[in-house]
Image (cartoon, rainbow, N blue to C red):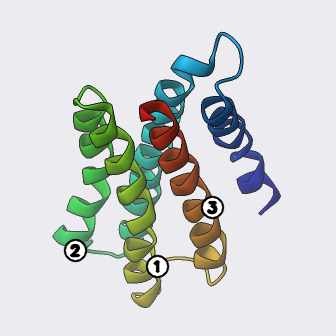
Amino acid sequence: MLLGVAGLIPPVLLAIIAWFDLGAFGPVAAGFLFTYAALIFAFLGGTWWAFACREDRPRLVLLVLAVAPPLLAWGLLPARPQTLVGYGLAALILLSPGVDALLRARGLTPRWWLRLRVPLSVVLALCVAAATYASTR
């Protein structure tokens, strides 16, 4: 949990910088945060792939779900308007624990996994949404 919380330091700081338009980084903080969120979302796909592969014959739907995050994040990053990028990433991250719950129901994740993933996803999604709002007001 401590390492997961440490991973929230960049998005929290970037959201604060974007919200309060602090210094030279204020105008670009949201973009940096979107990139960070896209990387985290892609990383989640890798974890889902690893969990799905714990089965002798992984279900195709689980493998497809695991490949979707990097493709969706990659597709969103260059999108316009910027609100589509930010709110899209926030929504995907907020919905991502649903895949974790599916994997947990199949017994493929550790019991503690959802207790880690849900709060981290909520905080990251809120940071992305706040930075998105701040960058468009």
Vertical comparison of 54 with 21: above or below: below
Answer few, some or many: residues within 10 Å of disc 3's Cα (few below 14, many 20 plus, some between 14 and 19).
Answer: many
**Mark 3 or 1, nearer chain start:** 1
Residue 109 or 88: which is nearer the viewer? 88
> Which of the pair 44/33 is nearer the observer?
33
Q: What residue is disc 2 on?
A: 59
- Mark 2: which amino acid? Arg
Q: Nearer the viewer, mark 2 or mark 3?
A: 3
Chain-order first, disc 2 or disc 3: 2
Q: Which residue is mark 1?
A: 108
Q: Position of residue 48 (x, y in %)?
A: 41, 62
Q: Nearer the viewer, mark 3 or mark 1?
A: 3
Residue under pointer 3: 120
Q: Horizontal and vertical percent for residue 50?
A: 43, 60
Q: In the rendered picture of this protein, how many numbered marks are placed on residues?
A: 3
Q: Residues within 10 Å of mark 1 (few under 14, many from 20)?
A: some
| Element carrying mark 1 | loop
